[in-house]
Image (cartoon, rainbow, N blue to C red):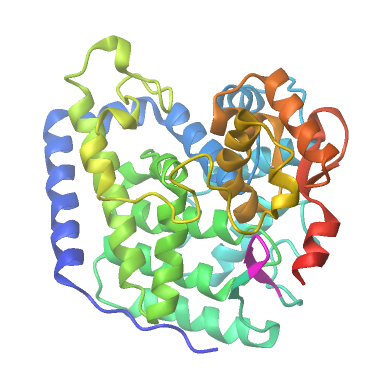
Amino acid sequence: MKLPDFSVTPDIESLALEIVEILEVMEKAGDVDLLFKLRKASRISSIQSSVAIEANSLTLEQVTDIINGRKVIGNPKEILEVQNAWYAYEGIGEYSPYSLKSFLDAHERMSNKLVREAGRFRSVQVGVYKGFELIHEGAKPEEIDSLMHQVFEWGEKSNTHPLIKSCVMHFLIEFVHPFEDGNGRMGRLWQTVILADWKQVFQWVPVETMIYQNQCGYYDALNESERQGDAAPFVVFMLNIIAYTLGVIVRSKALPQSRRGEAVTLPYLPDFSVYPDESVRITEKHPSIPDKPSLIPDIIPDIFTDKLSISEREFLVAIFSYLCEHGEINNYRAQTLTGKSADSVKKYFAKLVQIGLLQAVGKNKARVYRFAESLLQERD
């Protein structure tokens, strides 16, 4: 495997300059000091968003309780993911951003008791799947050590601005996919490590929250950079995310109190959806999501959809993209995607299992739903 190239485009230069200017405004206005005072809430938001991207179903309130030492009823693996992520993020001030040893130490914290090779590069081949399609194959195990040394050596020696460098290294970590599990969480964490080494305020800027709210754009940017063999598309996306997140912090101080704190429970951060015009430039509607509920994706045979009511079809369309990207979905995630109650979601899932489209795995709150094995076999 050969590492992709990287080109500095006018868009990248312009976005980096915009971020620097926003930071200057924040420093003069005292927003940096405010972020420091609210650092715990900000970090909890970052952690909840980062693990949620990887299909962790724990809510922000549950994550907050876990961090505060309160008992939470939930999937033990998901609770451990949160505890480990907190431990890993708490080490941000200790890590050396261009040290592979620090990188592996952080992964050990992030993956302790979750994977067999915590803190070590993987010894098995892995791939990233979107539904049934292999969209990215990680480096061969024997190539990983050399490739990651190249990545971190470039990071240490390059004169590229830290804003841009953090995005490039984030992309390269995802491209190599050096670990058995936790590659996404590590890529996002390590970008924060590099940014915080440049400006400490980035320890407390919940960039992961905006990534979580723009997951389709995030994965599309990763895929486009891989397709082009150039990190630039992903860098543009991430710089947009950073600039937008910082801009929201600045602008939100003028918003009414009732509209603050809705997205990440920080007093001065509003629901990001109040800025629809700017969010459009960050990501577009994912192409796999039909424009109309009646348009069920081709992957679902008519034999299934003919058995569904209109509301059941709408439910299927609403969860379909997430199910393809993550391979499974639970009741809580379906509630957030559809706006339906827990009881309604349970009934929809029961119908999809009954007709043989989905299968239920696990019990009670640990239950998840996946495409039925028979459907997968038909596709092979």
| Image x and y of residue 142, in percent | 68, 87
Q: Disc count in the image?
A: 0
Viewed as shown, does residue 303 lie left or right of 200?
right
Does 171 lie within the magenta span? Answer: no
Residue 378 falls in image quadrant: bottom right
Q: Residue at x 65, y 60 (%)?
A: 131
Pick whichever, 264 or 24, lies toward us: 264
| Image x and y of residue 322, in percent | 59, 47
The residue most toward the right is 363
The segment highlighted magenta reads 126-133
| Image x and y of residue 137, in percent | 62, 77
Q: Residue at x 77, y 23 (%)?
A: 73
Q: Is residue 247 visible?
A: yes
Pick whichever, 372 or 277, lies toward us: 372
Pick whichever, 293 or 274, lies toward us: 293
Above or below, 1 against 221 in this view is below
| Image x and y of residue 177, in percent | 59, 71
Does 127 lie within the magenta span? Answer: yes
Can you say which quadrant of the picture contains the C terminus? Answer: bottom right
Above or below, 173 against 295 in this view is below
Can you say which quadrant of the picture contains the N terminus? Answer: bottom right
Residue 366 falls in image quadrant: top right
Q: Is residue 193 visible?
A: no
Above or below, 210 against 103 in this view is above
How would you classify the magenta stretch by its main secondary structure?
A: strand
Above or below, 93 against 349 in this view is below
Q: Residue at x 80, y 31 (%)?
A: 350
